[in-house]
Amino acid sequence: MKNTSPEKRSPWGSRPPRVVALVPMRHDSERVPGKNHRDFAGAPLYHHILRSLLECGRVTRVVVDTDSPLIRADAARRFPDVVCIERPAALCGGEVSMNRILLHDVSLFEADFYIQTHSTNPLLRPRTIARAVDAFMAAYPGHDSLFGVTVLRSRLWDAAGRPLNHDPDVLARTQDLPPVYEDNSNLYIFTAAGLRRGGNRIGERPLFFEIPRQEALDIDEECDFRLAELAYHATRDQGGTT
């Protein structure tokens, strides 16, 4: 019997979508000095996320936005296919919103959609990035953005001592609690139009994309750096590379 259902058309026509990955990083860090270019498992920390983006098979171009001459010079030698841009002085400093930086970057590089991640996510694997892009493509335009989450099944309380996701009188097992989701700062996918419309990389209809807890480790403090490095070596010893 002939299928008469309408064929779903790609928003990009017959060509593959153009995907630009944005990796913002500063030369200095308040809590972990020099972390973005510090040695991590035998290479500068930022090398690991660039390799994952280049190997995932879904990215058209990788762009590093940085105020660091050291990173720009090293990336030019080690990653000739990566584009490095100098961050404008007006966008430097830890108090500047990441959304402002992203608005600047998307104005320079046209794409159908953008991935944004950080050098502080060294355990994020190429196959996970590829799965995220595929999930977003399948869900778009019903979902207008995607961000990585870690699923929590813990008893959570607010600052006033009120339970957020459980009944203390029932004390259900943690594995039976309804899940809550932490934005793990690993991965965001969005369009330029959505970013400009709302001023936010997370749109009005975001898709939650679960990333395994160990892979989602994000380096904010010195203890995170050491823990991530231990996890990195343990994962590689077990043969997990992609």
Image: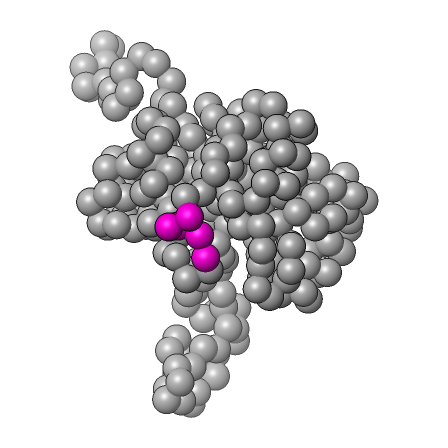
Residue 16 in view (yes/no): yes
Looking at the rendered image, the quarter that the N terminus falls into is top left
Q: Nearer the viewer, residue 12 or 115?
A: 115
Coordinates of residue 14 in the picture (x, y in percent): 31, 12
Q: Position of residue 2 (x, y in %)?
A: 23, 9
Residue found at the far right of this picture: 237
> Is residue 209 within the magenta segment?
no
Whether 91 is among the magenta residues is: yes
Snapshot quadrant of residue 160: bottom left
* First to last magenta residue range: 89-93
Residue 232 vertical placement versus 179 (above, below): above
Whether residue 199 is situated above or below residue 104 in the rendered picture: below
Residue 9 is situated, as x and y percent measured from the top left of the image, at 25, 20
Image-based side of 82 in relation to 41, left or right: left
Percent position of residue 141, x then y: 25, 35
Q: In which quarter of the image is residue 17?
A: top left
- Quadrant housing the C terminus: top right
Vertically, is 175 above or below 102? below
Q: In this view, does 237 lie above or below 31?
A: above
- Residue at 29%, 50% (x, y): give it: 200
Going 28% across and 36% down the picture, which residue do you hit?
192
**Which residue sits at x=37%, y=78%?**
164
Dominant secondary structure, magenta: helix
Which residue is drawn at the image coordinates 68% and 66% (left, top)? 223
Q: Report the side of 219 relative to 102 (left or right).
A: right
